[in-house]
Image (cartoon, helix red, strand yellow):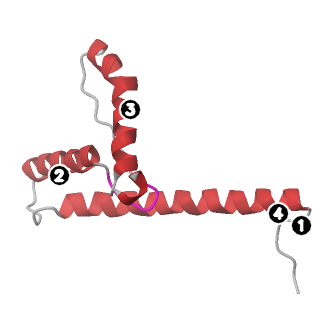
Amino acid sequence: MASKTPLVAAKNREVIKHSKYDLIAVNEKSSFVPFVMETFGGFGGEALNFLKQISRCHSELTPTPSPTGAFKTLVSRALSVCLQRGNALVQSYGCRHARMHAGVQVGFALP
């Protein structure tokens, strides 16, 4: 069962994105990396590899030394916060939409 397999949704989405964008990337003489995160914060395999690559480039090009993996940690934490903020916005919109259709006044009333 797919729901019991970790990151299967991310892997499926990577496959879909490859089928949609690989040919475009070839025509543009560039590379394509599907960057996929699952709703609860799991990173797809290709996203993790991409983060490792840019982290390595950062450590090679930065003039000041930093601990190994510090850049990758910083970026992955920032992306996780953005993802959860987006999740909260979707949930908030869904709640407001449901209340509106149920005839409940949307907003907050003062006591």
Mark nearest the camera among 4 and 2 is: 4
The mark found on residue 55 in the picture is 2
At numbered mark 4, what does the secondary structure look like: helix, strand or loop? helix
Foreground pick, 3 / 90: 3
Examine the rendered structure and indicate whether residue 104 appears above or below residue 19.
Answer: below
Q: Are marks 1 and 3 in contact (CB under 8 Å)?
A: no
Residue 94 sits in quarter: bottom right
* Circle 1 crowding by C-alpha within 10 Å: few under 14, some 14–19, many from 20: few
| Coordinates of residue 34 in the picture (x, y in percent) | 33, 37
Circles 1 and 2, Cβ within 8 Å, touching? The answer is: no
Residue highlighted by disc 3: 17
Q: CA distance from mark 4 to mark 2?
A: 44 Å
Residue 109 rendering spot, x and y as whole percentages = 87, 77
- Residue 104's label in the rendered image is 1
- Check if mark 4's residue and mark 1's residue have beta carbons within 8 Å: yes
Mark 4 — residue?
A: 99
On the rendered structure, is 100 left or right of 3? Answer: right
Q: Earlier in the sequence, mark 2 or mark 3?
A: 3
- Region rendered in magenta: 38-43
Judged by its main secondary structure, the magenta piece is: loop
Q: In which quarter of the view is residue 6 placed?
A: bottom left
| Residue for point 32% across, 17% down | 23
